[in-house]
Amino acid sequence: MPTPKYTGKLSLEEALTRRRSERSYYPNQLTNEQISQLLWAAQGITEPQWGFRAAPSAGSCYPLEVYLVNPKGVYNYIPQSHSLKLTLKDDQRPSLARAALGQNFISEAPINIVITAVFERTEEKYGQRAGRYVYMEAGHAAENIALMAVALGLGSVTVGSFWDDVVKSVLDLPAEQEPIYIIPVGYAK
């Protein structure tokens, strides 16, 4: 993927002011540069020596996994190399929309970013408080995506209403990963 840019044209204050939940998208595909920026905002490496990421993580446990779902397939984002690994071929967006209780804007959006978590990564260090920290981290990553979308002239919405087991099946997720968010992103109508 293209190297992420570390400066932009829109201030954080403007992005915060303009951010809205968008549920209707034009079919225009996103560029590789836009996708690169969105995924970097979610979990990209911001400090290479220590491996720190764009979203804070309790104890640097990094329980989140990020997936890109587009018309060509499902890809796991690999933060360490800022790259994508194909995990499933073909367009899974219609099935993902059905798994999300028929929220059809999910299949309409050119991409969806799905955030999952491996809770055990945080449980090893924090025990029963891990769930709280994992959900907080997922919220940080989701907000980063939403603000980056605005900065790129795009719209997004965070979706938490879906059948977890169906999302896991549709995306063929590993057993230890639990879906937390589906975030459609595209040019808002």
Image (spheres, rainbow, N blue to C red):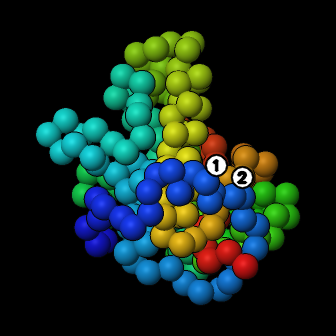
Quadrant of res 62: top left
Q: Position of residue 40 (x, y in %)?
A: 37, 57
Q: Does residue 113 appear left or right of residue 51 in this picture? A: right
Q: Position of residue 94 (x, y in %)?
A: 73, 73
Taking the spot 47% from the left edge, 41% from the top edge, the residue there is: 64
Q: Position of residue 21 (x, y in %)?
A: 72, 58
Q: Position of residue 117 (x, y in %)?
A: 53, 39
Q: Does residue 189 appear left or right of residue 9 in this picture? A: right
Residue contact at pointers 1 and 2, CB within 8 angstroms: yes
Quadrant of res 6: bottom left
Taking the spot 73% from the left edge, 47% from the top edge, the residue there is: 160
- Residue pointed to by mark 1: 181
- In this rendering, the answer to whether 35 lies above or below 60 is below
- In this rendering, the answer to whether 122 lies above or below 90 is above
Quadrant of res 76: bottom left
Taking the spot 85% from the left edge, 58% from the top edge, the residue there is: 101
Determine which of the numbered discs, if any, sits on residue 159 in the image. Answer: 2
Q: Secondary structure at mark 2?
A: loop
Three-letter amino acid code at disc 1?
Answer: Tyr
